Image (tube, grey):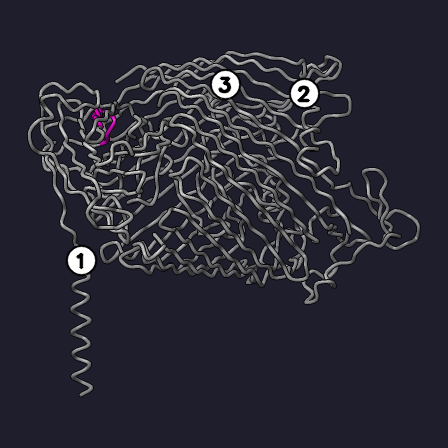
Amino acid sequence: MTIHKTKHLLLIIIFYLGVDAMSQESVIKKYSAIEIIGEPVIDGRLDDKCWEGSNWETDFKQWEPYNGEKPSQKTEFKLLFNENNLFVGIRAYDSAPDSIKCLTFKRDVIGGDYVGVLIDSYHDLRTAFVFRVSSAGTKSDYIIFNDGDGYEITWNPIWYTKVSMDSLGWYAEMKIPFSQLRFEKNSEKVWGLNVVRKIFRLPEINYWSHIPKDAPGFVHLFGELDNLQSIEPKKQLEVTPYIVGQTERFKEEPGNPFATGKKSMTKFGLDSKIGVSNNFIVDLTINPDFGQVEADPSEVNLTVFETFFEERRPFFVEGSNITSFDMGLENQDGNNNLFYSRRIGRKPSISPSYTEGEYIYVPEFTRILGAAKITGKTSNGLSVGIIESVTDKVRAEIDLNGNRRYETVEPLTNYFVSRIQKDFSKGETILGGMFTATNRKTGIDSLADQMHANSYTGGVDFTKAFHNRTYLLETQFAFSHLTGSKNSITKLQCSPIRQFQRQGIDHVSVDSSLTSLTGTGGKLIFRKNGNGHFNYKVAFSWSSPGFELNDIGYLRSADNITQLIWGGYNIWKPVGIFKALDFNLSEWSEWDFGGTNLLTALTYSSNFLFTNDWNIITVYNYFFNINDPYVLRGGPYLKLPQKNSFYFNISTGIKRKLAASIVSSFIRSNNNYRNESMIGITLRLRPNSHLFFSLEPQYSTHMNKLQYVNTTSYSSDARYIMGTLDQTTFSSTIRLNYFILPNLSIEYWGQPFFSTGKFSEFKYINNPTSKIFSERFNVYSSEQIHQNEDIYDIDENGDGSIDYTFSNPDFCVRNFLSNLVFRWEYHPGSTVYLIWSQTQINNRYSQETSVIDNFQKLFETVPHNVFLIKLSYRIGR
């Protein structure tokens, strides 16, 4: 009886496995474009004769909210082509045309109803070029890569589109030059194709080629576009010269030759795109200018870790997916990468020496003399990305009574980045490699002891998908090798992210005789990526003590081994009041290469999306076994109490004219050692289809009983001085945008930022790993510590003499950054910018913490104003 039951059970399992396998083999939809002579007038009306007749495709399915079901409104499309262009016509019928939402934004910021076409012209089943247009005529274009894992929204090809509307709905007409797509001539090749429509008021998204919500990928599920075999690849050729005029006004300082109150400049440059072949593009920039790019947000960073800022410069953002070698896991090291383009053109890294009475001028950024980039992908799946850039030597000017001297603060530097990947088995297997080089001329400018001369990094990666891409195995291995003088390599060993000089460790030590430093890093990930509600991931990564990426890449910390386990459950079809539900649980731990457990953490998160589009997100973290190797800045490990953190966000739906969200987070630790609280509000107002206003104020408090202050020595012993920090911070982001037309806009961005930190209860570490928290430090008594203006004098042994001193660490940061940009794209690819930028700073310390008091202090200062006009003109095809 038991045997028969077992046989029946096996048959049932085999049957359902077969059904599951068959369900994943979806039928590929096909569409044949129609060749025409001449071309239609792009006016959005679709009334040219070529649009008449059949071949209009109508079979769409919902992607959300009801995945796989019939759409609520009819949509149809037709594709035509001639020798040079692809033409797309889309009819978006609507039973309630008065409810079509028309919102005007600038390019790539799309809102309201929209339609679009997605083209996989490589037909690599991983990459798609997307062209979308809203019912208001705003166009958006971007590249999807890695089968939907990433997007590049800064891609701005030259194409043309218009829309129109009548009592039956609205219509879109597109003209896409073949020179803007990447493909090779192949008489047997088809392209991937999908068409999308969003109905904003519902909201509902429909695709022509159905994409299941649990699909392990995106692009590989496209339909096929046929009948384009007769077209010839077109090489792209564009040259865009520009001119910039700039004048500045700021506070004049009598006697300071570098602060005369005003200065002006004129600048010329050139950007170009040259098609080596239809699949490969060379981007060139000479003397680039990024004056229109928004400034980085303000911050106060009291840790040893470098803040990661996003890249916003168009030349470096475009094609960044090809040159990326992501080494991070989903924890605090998530931004680790062999290439971090913000290194190119960075702020000078050497501080010049000067004496009292001397005036000094140091340029804010290193000038980029020029850069070239080659990116592309062949029809057989070989993708290549190469970047070459040279930055100029930067010298600080130092003046004393009219006598001028110069010090080099950044040498002439060459940056080289190369990336290659090869797809096999329709993108289910990927093999790649990367190599970078940073070479500085340090010897000529006597900088050899301050910074290393050469840095080389490289790596290989391998990805394999199994069972219709449901399961994924990813592996990476990378190395770094740096060379320089003995002093420069010693500095690397003692850098904040490495700290070979740490006490109480035996797996690393400082070797001052070295002239090179070598390390390795990598990761191994296995994950279930779709085909069901439940997904999971197991991951492992490492960065050896000598691993270093921060010349041309980003590495938050070295000397660590990380393990991560994650599981998630997702419900994407509406259930009761919920439109979608998402639950996640993870555990991760870190060790150093000596075997010390640095940290263990548990994380729970959930996302509740309601049918009215309200959303609630919660995240809870529990940290324990914390042995911090960084907080004492080269000292021993410091055992820290376990802590809990909680994050909460509730937001309204975006369909309303006024949308709002509230975010709050807090951290609470045992022994009341660290407490943090934050609350933020976001208000977004859209009074009409052209005007947009947002306000995002945020207020936070931070208390830390073990905030690092200084390191000194006493009786041959190191003294790691800590204090209790009470910090309050207020910031806000303000945006006011008027989109007159999709290609004509006025945009304002402003950010006030105030942060005040007051230290008290100073102490020194004496037993950093004690099981009892209060025994890890000694608090200075009132007899041991005395404040003398901005200096604290310490009489530790009580004999009446000063044993050591440290500076008052209290701080106050006040600034207000503003940016007003008038932008007019008067011709495709040709733009006029009028820009006003203002910076106000007042960091004089005071204990006022109210927003009004800080604003009053801030506006007591003279602002620094920059007025800029930039004109570019595109020449090409």
In the rendered structure, which disc, 1 or 2, sits on the residue that comes first in sequence?
Answer: 1
Q: CA distance from mark 3 to mark 2?
A: 19 Å
Report the magenta residues as a range: 172-182
Q: Where is residue 392? Give x, y as percent.
A: 52, 23
Q: Where is residue 324? Give x, y as percent.
A: 39, 40
- Kindly identify which numbered label has been placed on residue 835: 3
Q: Amino acid at mark 2?
A: Val
Q: Amino acid at mark 1?
A: Ser
Report which residue position mark 1 lands on: 23
Report the front residue among 756 and 793. 756
Report which residue position mark 2 lands on: 862
Q: Are marks 3 and 2 in contact (CB under 8 Å)?
A: no
Residue 716 appears in the figure: yes
SS at mark 1 in the image: helix
Relative to 52, 666 lies left or right = right
Report the front residue among 235 and 490. 235
- Kindly identify which numbered label has been placed on residue 202: none
